[in-house]
Image (cartoon, grey):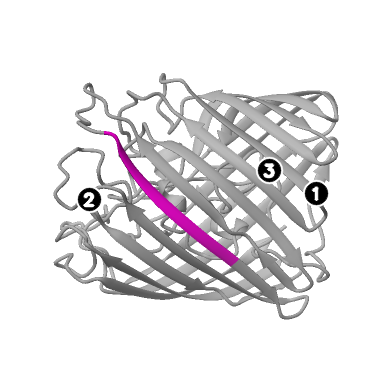
Amino acid sequence: MALAMWTLCAARPALADAHASPSPAPAAATPTPTPQPSPTGTSLTLGPLTIDGVLSAFTMFTTNVNAAGSLDTASGADLSNRTDISNAFIIVNKSSGTLRYGFAAGAYNIPVVGFALNKTTQTGANTSLYGALPSAYVEYAPSASFNVMAGKLATFTGQESTYTYENANIQRGIIWNIETAVSRGVRANFSGSRFNAGLEVNDGFYSGNRLGVEGQISNTPNASTTFEFVWVIPNASAPGNATASIANKQLYNPLLTYSTGRWAFSPYALWVISPASKALGYISAEHAFGAVLGVAYALSPTWSLPLRVEYGVNGSTRSDTSLNANLLGYGPGSRAWTFTLTPTYRRGVFFARAEASQAEVSAFTPGAAFGLSGSSSTQFRIGAETGIQF
């Protein structure tokens, strides 16, 4: 979601963290590398307001379904097929003048590779977590180079936004799943010709009254390259909640975006540290590491081929008993790879895409991986999504 200022929020399945973001105006369903043209803007205007919308549905077929994480089954085991609304948004913004504001309203489903899926309107997941008004903000912009925002703010972290229509892939990734999503706070943004920065005081992983700090600095030396570094330091004693099972995680996140011709590259790394906390029962500091490579190739102005490859590893050992040792989601000491390929077609307001993904885990805790017993090491999904975006 790099450099997106305002976004909606996401849902998280059991055992997984979720990270959310919709931008005030809909992003393309897949990035379009230069020199291929981006979709023509079709936003509606009503006086000073810009109105955008997204309506889409998806279906996913899964082998070796997750043994836990689905909230609509008695056992918690996932279903082999899920079909539902993926986005139903109306997004309104006033983005000119000194005083600006906006909101996004609707329903959303956030499928995550390697984790169980849930209904779009399931209590405790997806739309339920942040409600039907997951983004609302006010902004004071006295100049083109400085503004202050307050409200529900999307994180700076990572290269992926939360909602399916905003991203190159239908499913979010396992490293995205560790990141913060949206926070309630106040942010100052500074922008220049090559350097941009933002600093925010917020409630971390949607913790309510536990203050934390988030920031980013970026450099764009030319039109095709951006370097960025993001950090998130929440309150060390912030307890877990419905949006993050471990909510005191510090995040350190270098990112690069680069495009050339028909190619676009968006690699990033993520270092995660969960401090020890006597109040939370975290007997030791724990850490994890993730690396993500996103690549997109524009076959034509209407067809593109995005690929995401991820690696994540817990820094703990399999025998670690600290309650914060399972940052990745498959048990202390676990490791995972994911591969996601998403051929995409877009023409005007219409988009359609297919997706194939595979998750492979090792050194997992029995019961925390795939299959009805949670003891299988691989999971394969195939799915599709289609809809309109204006």
Q: CA distance from mark 3 to mark 1?
A: 26 Å
Q: Which residue is mark 1?
A: 221
**Image height of 249 relative to 307, above or below:** above
Q: CA distance from mark 1 to mark 2?
A: 41 Å
Q: Secondary structure at mark 1?
A: strand
Q: Quadrant of the C terminus?
A: bottom right
Q: Position of residue 115 (x, y in %)?
A: 33, 60
Task: Give neighbour class at mark 2: few <14, some 14-19, many 20+ (Cα, 10 Å).
Answer: many
Task: Give neighbour class at mark 1: few <14, some 14-19, many 20+ (Cα, 10 Å).
Answer: few
Q: Secondary structure at mark 3?
A: loop
Viewer-closest of 55 and 166: 166
Identify which residue is drawn at 64% across, 70% down.
296
Q: Earlier in the sequence, mark 3 or mark 1?
A: 3
Magenta part of the chain: 285-294
- Position of 47 with respect to 324 (left or right) is right
Does residue 290 show up magenta in the picture? Answer: yes
Does the image show residue 125?
no
Identify which residue is drawn at 60% across, 47% down.
22
Mark 2 vs 3: CB contact within 8 A: no
**Image height of 227 relative to 59, above or below:** above
Q: Position of residue 369 (x, y in %)?
A: 23, 63
Viewer-closest of 268 and 342: 268
Magenta span dominant secondary structure:
strand
Identify which residue is drawn at 25% across, 73% down.
64
Q: Which residue is mark 2?
A: 332
